Amino acid sequence: MHDNRDPLQPHAHEPNPEPPSADPSFELVLPDGRTQTITVSDLEKLPETAVPNCYIVSTGHGTTGPFTFSGVTLQEFAQVYASDGWSQAEVISADGFGNRVFAEELARPDAAGPIVLAYKVDGRPLTRQEGLVRLIVPSERDDALRQVKWVGVIRLRP
């Protein structure tokens, strides 16, 4: 049976304790429809940003942190790969959960810190179990519906 829910619409999300896939790469879909496979090594070539005082709020598991997550800001990532041809980024987990982030939001980061594609936590690489690459939204403190663990696809939309 195919699940027709839009992963970018608000919905409950049960935690998935195990990685949905062994593949650590993710797919980037550019505004013109071209695709590219992105690895942690690709992300490490971009400027690294560390964001302290981040918390993970997981359904049924409570709040953990604070952590310092490091990686590339979503804004820098999008600008490197798509220049100015995008207005929103859809970040979808390999387990089907997603978040939509608008370019205007990235241009005006929250005081808590910029949104990052994190591949490190507290100075060490994230494990596959921890997400390997995860979208961190530092301003989110309540329900983790914007955090995306196990990034599987990023679509940059015009």
Image (cartoon, rainbow, N blue to C red):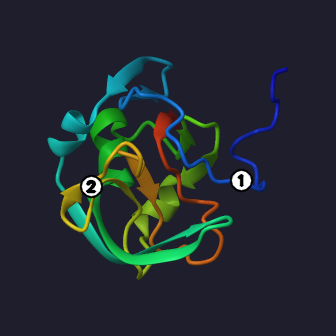
Q: Is residue 55 left or right of residue 48?
A: right
> Which of marks 1 and 2 precedes in the sequence?
1
Q: Is residue 84 left or right of residue 156?
A: left
| Horizontal and vertical percent position of residue 82 | 36, 34
Q: Which residue is mark 1?
A: 13
| Horizontal and vertical percent position of residue 126 | 30, 52
Q: Which amino acid is tagged 1?
A: His
125 w.r.t. 122: above or below: above
Q: Which mark is residue 53?
A: none
Q: Which amino acid is tagged 2?
A: Gly
Marks counted in the figure total 2
Q: Secondary structure at mark 1?
A: loop
| Horizontal and vertical percent position of residue 75 | 36, 53
144 w.r.t. 79: above or below: below
Q: Residues within 10 Å of mark 2 (few under 14, many from 20)?
A: many
Q: Secondary structure at mark 2?
A: strand
How far apart marks 2 and 1 lie (CA) works out to 24 Å
113 w.r.t. 124: above or below: below
Point 23% across, 63% down: residue: 49
Q: Which residue is mark 2?
A: 71
Residue 158 visible in the displayed image: no
Instruction: Pick the residue in front: 63 or 75.
Output: 63
Q: Can you tell which quarter of the image residue 80 is in? A: top left
Point 53% across, 58% down: residue: 147
